[in-house]
Image (cartoon, rainbow, N blue to C red):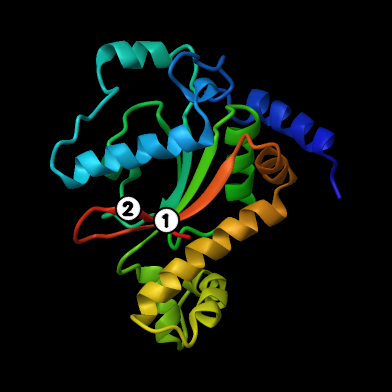
């Protein structure tokens, strides 16, 4: 098993070799370095409330912000969510350039590449919050629930969601929604279990990893218990 030191050495090397844009000096100020996990979450929820109410401010999108970000980045939250075109974190959290470190794939799945990206944001950019956001009417969840043969590589997506189907079995209410919620929670557990960097930051109180659900009808984000 790799030690934390070895993993950190790799992350630093990757930032120099594979991720030259991300390796720029971290931009300080109101960004991640000054926010706790709790205040970062509140900032997301405040933005979502503005979005739901039709009062989005669309912050940090002007010329000055773009110039600031040429010096580096310090996103205050990592958001892993679905690739669904209806699910756009910068919009439903009402955030701008440099605010969120966003990772997306069909079904908001956790694999080695996603874990590496999260670890980069936590270890190198010092993001204090990771949120896994599932959503209403997720096609990947629907495909998993439908069963049968999934063509091509879609089958690999379906397989990753099957544990959530089992976890949600027997729960009252809508089966698809229950599975979506269970899947987001399982992905949170997967991140903490498989990443020593994340687990260490959580243990130290520097990081929170949470599950959430986005409602397509209302635009509201619900933090899951």
What secondary structure is marked by label 2? strand
Q: Which residue is identified by label 2?
A: 221
What secondary structure is marked by label 1? strand
Image location (x, y in percent) of residue 42: 39, 37
Which label sits on residue 212? Answer: 1
Position of residue 31 relative to residue 136, above or below, is above
Question: Are the residues flagged by discs 1 and 2 in contact, CB closer than 8 Å?
Answer: yes
Residue depicted at x 44% and y 83% = 171
Judge left or right: residue 24 versus residue 43.
Answer: right
Residue 26 visible, this orientation:
yes
Residue 90 visible, this orientation:
no
Image location (x, y in percent) of residue 153: 51, 69
Image location (x, y in percent) of residue 34: 51, 21
Residue depicted at x 59% and y 28% = 126
Residue depicted at x 65% and y 32% = 123
Residue depicted at x 52% and y 60% = 109
Image location (x, y in percent) of residue 217: 19, 61
The front one of 67 and 199 is 199
The front one of 38 and 50 is 38
Position of residue 149 relative to residue 54, above or below, is below
Q: Quadrant of residue 116?
A: top right
Judge left or right: residue 62 versus residue 22.
Answer: left
């Amino acid at each position: 098993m790799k030690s934390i030191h070895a993993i950190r050495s790799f992350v630093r090397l990757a930032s120099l070799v594979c991720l030259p844009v991300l390796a720029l000096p971290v931009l300080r100020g109101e960004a991640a370095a000054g926010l706790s996990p709790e205040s970062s979450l509140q900032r997301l929820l405040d933005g979502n409330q503005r979005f739901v109410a039709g009062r989005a401010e669309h912050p940090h999108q002007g010329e000055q912000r773009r110039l600031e970000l040429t010096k580096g980045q310090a996103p205050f939250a990592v958001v892993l969510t679905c690739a669904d075109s209806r699910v756009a974190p910068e919009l439903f959290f009402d955030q701008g350039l440099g605010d969120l470190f966003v990772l997306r794939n069909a079904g908001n799945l956790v694999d080695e590449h996603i874990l590496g990206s999260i670890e980069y944001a936590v270890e190198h950019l010092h993001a204090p919050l990771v949120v896994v956001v599932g959503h209403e009417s997720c096609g990947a969840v629907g495909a998993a629930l439908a069963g049968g043969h999934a063509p091509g590589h879609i089958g690999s997506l379906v397989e990753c969601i099957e544990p959530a189907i089992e976890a949600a079995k027997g729960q009252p209410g809508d089966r698809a929604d229950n599975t979506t919620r269970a899947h987001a929670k399982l992905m949170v557990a997967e991140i903490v279990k498989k990443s020593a960097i994340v687990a260490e930051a959580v243990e130290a109180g520097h990081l929170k990893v949470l599950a959430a659900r986005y409602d397509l009808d209302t635009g509201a984000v619900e933090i899951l218990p």
